[in-house]
Amino acid sequence: MTYDPDQPRAPKGVPEGGQWVEAGKAARAAAGLPAVSEKAEQACSEFAAKYRNLAAYERCEFIDPDTGEVFFDKSGLETSIDLTEVFWLYRDRCKGAILTHNHCAMEAAHSTSDILTAGKLQLGQIRVVTPLYQHILAPGERGWDGVFDMPLNKSFEMAKTLATGVIRNKYGNAFSMAMTDFSKGPPAPMAVEWVYEMMSQFASSRGLRYCRIPNK
Ligand SMILES: [Zn+2]
């Protein structure tokens, strides 16, 4: 891999950190995601390292995409965080910003309410941190417009059906939907693959961009 003086770097002391950040950069570029500053990427990575295995409650950080500054953070409940004050006080600052949050140590990516929040606040991207990945969803050419076209759960159901077809083609009956209940402990690798497939299908159906980058 060629050295790029501008490439994001992982903090000192993280083994193979450079490689990890580089792989993330490549994944994001392939997905057509807008680049964020090195400092913002660093802030996201630090959040992921700290909270990817946090199971007791959700925590979020709103990050400035240029400076990497965390301009709002909050801890919530097991499946939600009340963001009323963000809508009241930080609406302007949220435009183009990054929202990252954990999903209580489960391997599930964005919820419908995550995506609606991102659309309403016109975020630059919304990240879900799971034990294994940062899942990144960002607007496409139509911005977040596609989010409001029709109920999101319709597209989710369709994406799940398509993803199930893809994974069954690959693994046959070794894959079952029960594996996608991530509340039941560590997920099967094929269920993790199913999430990636499902989110990719969902994002393209709504004109959004999705990728995931591995945690280290
Ligand atoms: Zn969420």
Image: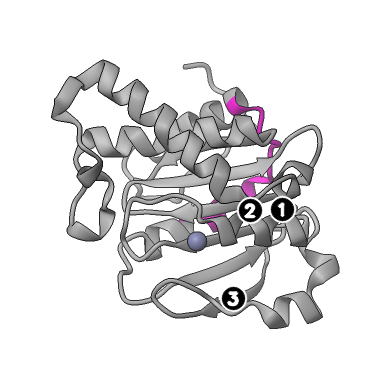
Dot placed on the residue nearer the N-terminal end, 2 or 1: 2
Q: Magenta span covers which residues?
A: 31-45
On screen, residue 49 above or below 167: below
Which residue is painted at 64% across and 66% down in the image? 62
Verify CB contact (< 8 Å) between mark 2 and mark 1: yes
Q: Which residue is mark 3?
A: 73
Q: Which residue is mark 1?
A: 65
Which residue is painted at 72% across and 60% down in the image? 64
Residue 40: give its label. 2
The answer to whether residue 65 is left or right of residue 210 is right
Type of residue at label 2?
Ala
Q: Nearer the viewer, residue 78 or 70?
A: 78
Residue 133, position as x, y percentages in the image: 39, 45
Residue 12, position as x, y percentages in the image: 42, 50
Q: Secondary structure at mark 1?
A: loop
Dot placed on the residue nearer the N-terminal end, 2 or 3: 2
The answer to whether residue 22 is left or right of residue 133 is right
* Spatial separation of the CA atoms under disc 2 and disc 1: 5 Å
Type of residue at label 1?
Pro
